[in-house]
Amino acid sequence: MNADGSHPEEVLEKGCYVVDASRDGKYFIGTLFNGKEVGIYQISIADRQIVALLPGVVTFMVRFASDGKSFLYPVVSHNEVTIYRQAWSDGKILGKPQIALKLPFAFGSFYQGGNAYDIARDFSTIVYARPGGQADFYLMSRER
């Protein structure tokens, strides 16, 4: 649609939860986080096609990294959150996912029906909801 909200146009009838767009504007990236087709998907805007990039990966958030050559996604386990980096170029997966960052604490993916966290592309800021708990503040810095 245009910036003023006029002329909306459907890209796909059945898609995924779109979270981000590639720098060149050719692709959307998103997730299906429940059901039989759970995973990370991309949508080619020109082709109007959805493609499973990482089937079976359960995550709520996925976004292109600041380098534009990979995307990031967290996987929440019982005691920690692992953020993976997957190399990507022009709609193609390159290699296997690598661990980009491990957080020594866990947080939920959803809170009151919505997203419960956000992570900056450069990991400088991580914000999450912790229902019923105290407010925690973590300073993330790279070792020198």
Image (cartoon, helix red, strand yellow):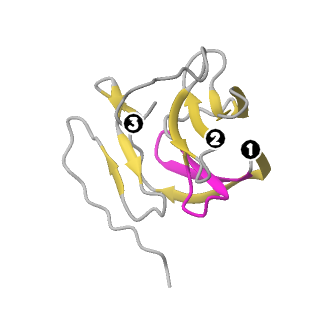
- Judged by its main secondary structure, the magenta piece is strand
Indicate the position of residue 49 as horizontal and vertical percent values.
Answer: 71, 26
> Mark 1 = which residue?
91
Q: Is residue 62 visible?
A: no
Q: Are marks 1 and 3 in contact (CB under 8 Å)?
A: no
Question: Which of pointers 1 and 2 lies earlier in the amino acid sequence?
Answer: 2
- Seen in the image, is 84 located left or right of residue 6? right
**Residue 6 percent location from the top left of the image:** 39, 26
Q: Marks 1/2: CA distance?
A: 7 Å
Q: What residue type is disc 1 on?
A: Gly
At mark 3, the secondary structure is loop
**The quarter of the displayed image where residue 139 is located:** bottom left
Measured from the top left, where is residue 4 in percent x and y? 34, 34
Q: Where is residue 27 shown, x and y percent of the image?
A: 64, 41
Rendering quarter of residue 91: top right
Considering the numbered disc 2 on the image, is that residue within a helix, a strand or a loop?
Answer: strand
4 and 14: which is toward the camera: 4
Q: Which residues are magenta?
A: 64-89
Residue beneath the point at 60% across and 21% down = 15
The kind of residue tagged 2 is Tyr
Determine which residue is flagged by label 3. 108
Q: Which residue is mark 2?
A: 27
Residue 97 visible in the picture: yes
- At 42% from the left edge and 57% from the top edge, which residue is drawn? 120
Lower sequence index among marks 1 and 3: 1
Name the outermost residue toward the right. 95
Q: Does the magenta segment cover residue 65?
A: yes
Give, as a three-letter code, the residue at label 3. Gly
Q: Name the residue located 62 percent from the left edge and 58 percent from the top edge.
A: 68
